Amino acid sequence: MESKLFCWILLSLLILSCFVSQTNEKMQGQTLVYLYKSRLKQNFGVDTSLFKVIDHVNEANVHPQVGLKEEDRIERLPGQLLANFSQYGGYVTVHKSAGRALYYYFVEAHHSKNPLPLLLWLNGGPGCSSLAGALLELGPFRVHSDGKTLYTNKFSWNYAANVLFLESPAGVGFSYSNTTSDYDKSGDSRTAADNYVFLVNWLERFSEYKDRDFYISGESYAGHYVPQLAHTTLYHNKKVNKTIINLKGIIIGNAVINDETDEQGMVDYFGSHAIISDQDVYQIHKYCDFSPNATSQSRECEASYGALEENIIDINVYNIYAPMCFSSDVTTRPKKASILEFDPCSINYMYVYLNRPDVQEALHANVTKLTHDWELCGDTIQVWRDSPSTIIPLLKEFMSNGIRVWIFSGDIDGRVPVTSTKYSINKMKLPVKTAWHPWFLNKEVGGYTQVYEGDLTFATVREAGHQVPSYQPARALSLIKHFLEGKPLH
């Protein structure tokens, strides 16, 4: 059996585990297909040639941006309370001849004495929208259960930075291409190239941020997106021997870093949290080959994963202790909402909200009238051309170039769990600078952290699932503040 088919079977099992008891399988599937890389990718193995930069930064793709900023200004979103910050939304063309354009949503920082940095946020997938970050995680608003009104997130990351959410690649969310064959050419390298062209043009449009300290953040498969965009940025800075984009650091959460250890860590996490038996863990480690060059798997391995399926099918592996959503309906009147108690049906509310014509008009989105709904994780992209099995070489590159690197992990995520991240970091064989210790928020342990030589920080966030800011917004805000300020957690 092909290794990639084996991986897809495993991913299918994980996704199916989240369908149980749902009244709307399509929507729940879109919610939880945060990591279907194994089905899509065609390149396997540790191939650092995949880190080569696709360079289509040229006169045809760098456009005049005069006046476009004010055209993108969002006066007020439907159902929004008053806000003391500016927000913008719109499109940036990244490939003129193909008609490829990426949608962004930008919220400036709350009032601050000092200019705050620019922070880009990317959700993963591949194929999932970063508007999830905006409306489910770290943005200034969340959607009420009526699908019509918004409430305030008092732990929004725009208390720490000016936050830019980007839907990429083309085909995700509101982003599109007029050349439909583009959707079959997606992959890590072109995503990084398009995202970089987006940034160059966006910084022309918002020129006041050109010299601002810039950081890239994201979660899940953005463990590929973020480092590869940072790599592309460094490449172009060195190519012209000047700072085009003032990159200072990256931060990735519950991130896909190294396929082999990601899979091993997931199995061990299930075992250590009493989700699968010790015997199943033993059998999987004995009979399954996690290496990126594996070409087949034994019957014993397949049988062991069958047993794993039986034990995870009734839980949400993205937060092993979270309640499930048992209704896709929105309510006539908004039920009581709390930022501190994440509603498992929130994706349903966001889906309804973002598909309203008045909301799309306010966001300056869907200007080409797409043939499909906005979806969190849609099916426009069916092929993923390149996906190296590890991005560890890039992390080492950043450390050698003085780029701050933080990796964080919600400790109740079962999909890219804390064990996976620890195993992946251990592969780097880095000397420890500051030993493992708890960090605190409001006198309570917020998680644990360890700092390595070369300016790499690993931090856990206690009681957080795969989408850390959704489940622990206060701790997530504290984390990002420490990262941006370059201050150790304590």
Image: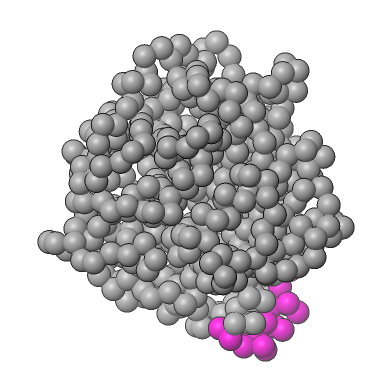
Residue 399 is situated, as x and y percent measured from the top left of the image, at 78, 43
- What secondary structure is the magenta-colored segment mainly? helix
Q: Can residue 386 be seen in this view?
A: no
Q: Is residue 323 above or below residue 374?
A: below
Judged left or right of residue 118, residue 234 is right
User: Residue 71 at x, y = what percent?
Assistant: 31, 21
Total labels: the figure holds 0
Residue at 42% in and 40% down: 110
Q: Residue furthest front?
A: 113
- Quick check: is 430 in the magenta stretch? no
In the shown orientation, is residue 421 left or right of residue 312?
right
Q: Which residue is drawn at 36% across and 74% down?
A: 324
Left or right for 487, reference 115 = right
Q: Would residue 214 be seen by someone viewing this image from the given angle?
A: yes
Q: Is residue 223 above or below residue 274?
A: above
> What is the quadrant of residue 290 in the picture?
bottom right
Which quadrant is the C terminus positioned in?
bottom right
Residue 3's place in the image compared with 185, above or below, is below
Q: Write the residue at 68% across / 22% down.
A: 243
In the image, farthest residue toward the left: 332
Question: Does 281 lie within the magenta span?
Answer: yes
Q: Which of 403 and 100 is in front in this view?
A: 403
**Does residue 110 appear to the left or right of 82 in the view shown?**
right
Residue drawn at 63 percent across, 48 percent down: 483
Image quadrant in which the N terminus is located: bottom right
Residue 96 vertical placement versus 448 (above, below): above
Query: Residue 474's spot in the image, x, y percent?
Result: 48, 60
Instruction: Report the front residue among 382 and 46.
Output: 46
Residue interval drawn in magenta: 274-289
> In terms of image quadrants, where is residue 69?
top left
- Could you tell me residue 341's position as x and y percent? 37, 68
